[in-house]
Image (cartoon, rainbow, N blue to C red):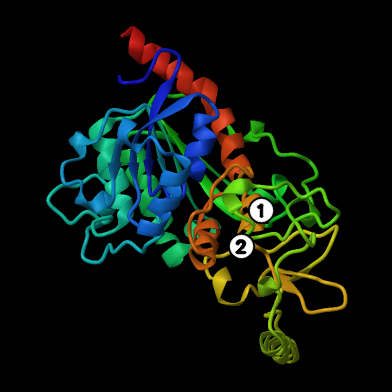
Amino acid sequence: MDSDQGRFAFADLFAGIGGIRQAFEGIGGKCAFTSEWNPYAQQTYAANFPHREMHVFNNDITSVKDASTVPDHDVLLAGFPCQPFSIAGVSKKNSLGRAHGFSDPTQGTLFFDVKRIIDAKQPAAFLLENVKNLQTHDGGRTFAVIRRTLEEELGYHVKFEVVNGLHFTPQNRERIMIVGFREPTDFSFESLERPAEGSKIESVLHRTDGTEPVLPHDEGRYFDHSRNRVPDRYTLTENLWTYLQNYAAKHRAAGNGFGYGLVREGMTTRTLSARYYKDGSEILVEQLGTRPRRLTPRECARLMGFEDSFRIPVSDTQAYKQFGNSVVVPAIGAVAKLMAPHIWQAVTRKRAA
């Protein structure tokens, strides 16, 4: 194994801007392989993990035709996109992963690439992260194929849990965490440390009392320290604010809850999405005496649990997309911490063999 003494190696698939990587570096992991296809996400990743030359960086995981060429690793990490799996024309026996000579039900999906790398490299453990609705996606068929693949075809011992980021940041963000170990363990999500009371929105907002930290790498883009205020460009235009209010009123009259989400001190937010750049409607910050505003990209970073040292080298539009697609870092960190003793036990056994 290429791990340094006292560390373990991991592969970071569908890496985005590195949120999962940060969490596993926090428990002693060393990145051996990264894959991320989006050029703007690559830009942010490179700004925050500048030593790409120290490990293999691959743009598109589907371009890795021979999974055995992926560097050895102890843990595989993947926040893979959710796609439907076609099982049409496949026998019941094959759908259980026990037949040969038929089409693989995961073929053509990005989970297939996760599967073939796990199959080729046999890591001691993995963590797969996805939206909560993965369990019900495509009538439950997607998750059923994933479980059968991981457990019956690949032979891993799998546990899964929906974890809400609200325990760790002031954002309601439920994500399913799928943990697998090559050998039996007593790993259980029941021991996951979830703070009883999470923080509120004011913990991530720019402070207008003169105590907002100066971040040289932000270059004053997100906060005007000379006036102790967020730049006016983040305040909604009169036309957009009128449109959002009318849209919300129309849907309230129709008996549903569609509309903007307005937050103030003491509150938590809805889920930050990749479409936040369009109008910011799911999370609007109340401003007394004027129209509400969007979160700034720095506030989005904080909402996802990234420290202020995290660099944002891209445009606001790309930053909103990236944070909306990322993970709540401390939530992943809590799962990583729970996995850590079992990872170390497996790595120690492997090195002693």
Q: Residue at point 48% right, 59% down? A: 314
Q: For the N terminus, which image quadrant?
A: top left
* Residue 174 visible in rendering: yes
Would residue 16 appear left or right of 253 to someone viewing this image?
Answer: left
Amino acid type shown at disc 2: Leu
Would residue 66 appear left or right of 277 to someone viewing this image?
Answer: left
Q: Residue at point 34% right, 15% down? A: 350
108 is higher (above) or lower (below) than 125: below
Q: Residue at point 54% right, 48% down? A: 311
Element assignment for label 1: helix
**Circle nearer the N terminus (2, 1):** 2
Q: For the C terminus, which image quadrant?
A: top left
View extreme (left): residue: 101
174 is higher (above) or lower (below) than 66: below
Q: Which residue is mark 1?
A: 303
Residue 120 position in % (x across, y down): 23, 35
Q: Are marks 2 and 1 in contact (CB under 8 Å)?
A: yes
Amino acid type shown at disc 1: Leu
